[in-house]
Image: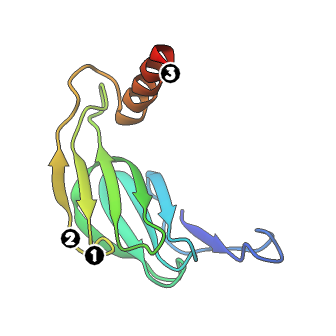
Amino acid sequence: MIASGNLSGSIGINWVARDSSRAWSAVASSADGTKLVATVKGGQIYTSINSGVTWTPQDTSRNWSSVASSADGTKLVATVGDNINLIGDIYTSINSGAGWSASGSGIGNGFPWHHQRTEQNKSRQSMA
């Protein structure tokens, strides 16, 4: 279930369910909280331009695993992973999620994208 609440003042005391229960896997927000993007594992990406009051399904169903947003909410990036080793494509959007393009393929070593980045950072730190 997607819920939204006012994070200023009441700091999350009041929450309202905004969409049905799904296998939500990730959510990201623009800096001002008006543009939101949420992914569903084995489902679509959903976007909102009104702080989560309404949601619009985008792109086709995939095994979405993570998502991130630029400060203004126009540039988005999301990862797709299979159910076994999380290797999959990276998708980008430059129009607040209205269109998506595959921009890379899985790494191929069995690590999910976020784990691979962590391992790369550890390698760089050990070289310093």
For mark 2, what is the residue? 99
Amino acid on which the number 3 mark rests in the picture: Gln
Residue at 50% across / 21% down in the picture?
125
In the rendered view, does 14 fall on the left or right side of 93? right
Q: Where is residue 20 in the image (x, y as percent from the top left)?
A: 48, 67
Amino acid type at circle 1 is Asn
| Residue occupying image coordinates x 17% and y 38% | 105
Q: Is mark 3 on a helix, strand or loop?
A: helix
Nearest-to-viewer mark from 2 and 3: 3
Protein image colouring: rainbow
Measuring from the top left, give residue 4's x and y in whole percent: 62, 72
Q: How crowded is mark 2: few (under 14 residues within 10 Å), some or many (20 or more)?
A: few
**In this view, 127 is above or below 89:** above
Q: Residue at x 58, y 77 (%)?
A: 32
Mark 1 surroundings within 10 Å by alpha-carbon count, few (fewer than 14), some (14 through 19), many (20 or more): few
N-terminal label among 2 and 3: 2
Question: Which quadrant of the figure has residue 1?
Answer: bottom right
Left or right, 91 with respect to 56, comes to left
Residue 46 lies, with reference to residue 124, above or below; the image says below
Q: In this view, does 100 lie to the left or right of 83?
A: left
Q: Which mark is residue 125?
A: 3
Q: Are marks 1 and 2 in contact (CB under 8 Å)?
A: yes
Residue 64 in percent (x, y) is at: 33, 49
**Discs 2, 3 touching: Cβ within 8 Å:** no
Q: Earlier in the sequence, mark 1 or mark 3?
A: 1
> Is residue 108 rendered to the left or right of residue 84?
left
What distance separates the C-alpha of mark 1 from that of mark 2?
A: 7 Å
Indicate the secondary structure of the residue bearing disc 2. loop
In the rendered view, would you say 37 is above or below 102?
A: below
Image spot of residue 27 (x, y percent)? 49, 58
| Residue carrying label 1 | 95
Measure how far apart labels 2 and 3 are at the Cα level: 37 Å
